[in-house]
Every structure is written in structure tokens, then in C-alpha cells.
Image (spheres, grey):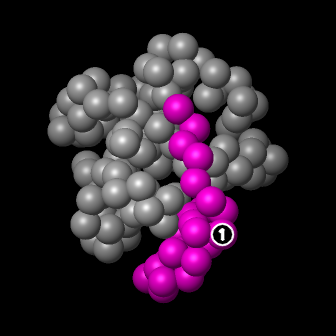
Amino acid sequence: MSVHLDTHVTLWLYSGQIERLSKRAADLINREPVGVSPAVLLEMQYLRKIGRIAAMPRTIIADLRRRLGLAVEDCSLAAVAERALELTWTRDVFDRLIVAHAALDGSKLVTSDRLILGHYPKAIW
């Protein structure tokens, strides 16, 4: 089991903005294996499409795999979608999938998203 990263945390780590992380989040990332849901890759592709980021998601993941040992976690899409149906506290599809995947893995999720922090007990900031 690894610590899951939310999309914005993944992008901050890629761009070297470690100072944006809380001390608790940075310590956890330095201490535990880290991973992302495939939904993070989809959200990054969406952000690239709308011009919010320039790098390709595969480039970001490859770089973080090399630097941090980041893994793209595998889980049944059907199971993730089923769990995401229960997460009615947000309309954000990416957040629902990312949180559902972390929950199915029983993993902590590093995020600064207040809504996630307020609803997912294993969210860390």
C-alpha cells in the first residue's frame, strides 16, 4: 500500500514546488511509497487540454517515477466507479475517482483540497 497523491500535489512535486506542501505532507511523501490513481493522469490530460499545464502526463509520471519511485496504482475501474457513486459531497468527477481509489486501497491521500480534507478521513495535509 502506498500514499496516494492528489493531482495538484503531483504537479507541485513535478515542478519542484515542494515548499507548497505542508511539513506533514512532505514528511509523509519522503517516508512512504507514493502512488497516484490513473484518474490523476486523466485530470492532468484535461488540464493540459485547457492550457493549465504544458507537460504531457506520461512525462510527469516518468519523471516522478525516476525521482520518487512514484507508481500508478492499479485497481478495478468498476470497483472505483462503484465506490465513487457513494461520494455525493462533490460533483468533481476527478475528485470522486481519486478519493474512491484511495479509499479502496485503504490509503492516505495527500491533498490540500478542503472539501476532500473534510470528507475523506485518511486525507492528509
Instruction: Tally the marks.
Output: 1
Which residue occupies the extreme top position in the image? 66
Work out whether residue 37 or residue 113 is closer to the camera in this orientation and state it: 37
Identify the secondary structure beneath mark 1. helix
Residue 88 is covered by the magenta coloring: yes
On the rendered structure, is 69 left or right of 19? Answer: right
On the rendered structure, is 82 left or right of 30? Answer: right
> In the figure, residue 93 lies in which quadrant?
bottom right
> In the figure, residue 77 lies in which quadrant?
bottom right
The answer, for residue 52, to whether it is visible in the render is no
Q: Residue at x 21, y 30 (%)?
A: 27
The answer, for residue 125, to whether it is visible in the render is yes
Give the magenta range: 71-97
- Please state which amino acid type lies under the numbered disc 1: Ala
Vertical order, 122 against 18 (above or below): below
On the rendered structure, is 24 left or right of 74? Answer: left
Residue 59 is covered by the magenta coloring: no
The quadrant of the picture occupied by the N terminus is top left
On the rendered structure, is 2 left or right of 45? Answer: left
Q: Residue at x 57, y 66 (%)?
A: 80
Which residue, given by chain and number where applicable, does mark 1 sit on? 78
Picture coordinates of residue 55, whole percent (x, y)? 72, 29
Q: Residue at x 62, y 72 (%)?
A: 81
Picture coordinates of residue 111, whole percent (x, y)? 37, 51
Q: Callout 1: 10 Å neighbours few (<14), some, many (20+)?
A: few
Picture coordinates of residue 99, whole percent (x, y)? 46, 63
Vertical order, 86 against 20 (above or below): below
Vertical order, 2 against 97 (above or below): above
Picture coordinates of residue 28, whole percent (x, y)? 24, 34
Q: Residue at x 37, y 40 (%)?
A: 2
Work out whether residue 76 or residue 69 is closer to the camera in this orientation and state it: 76
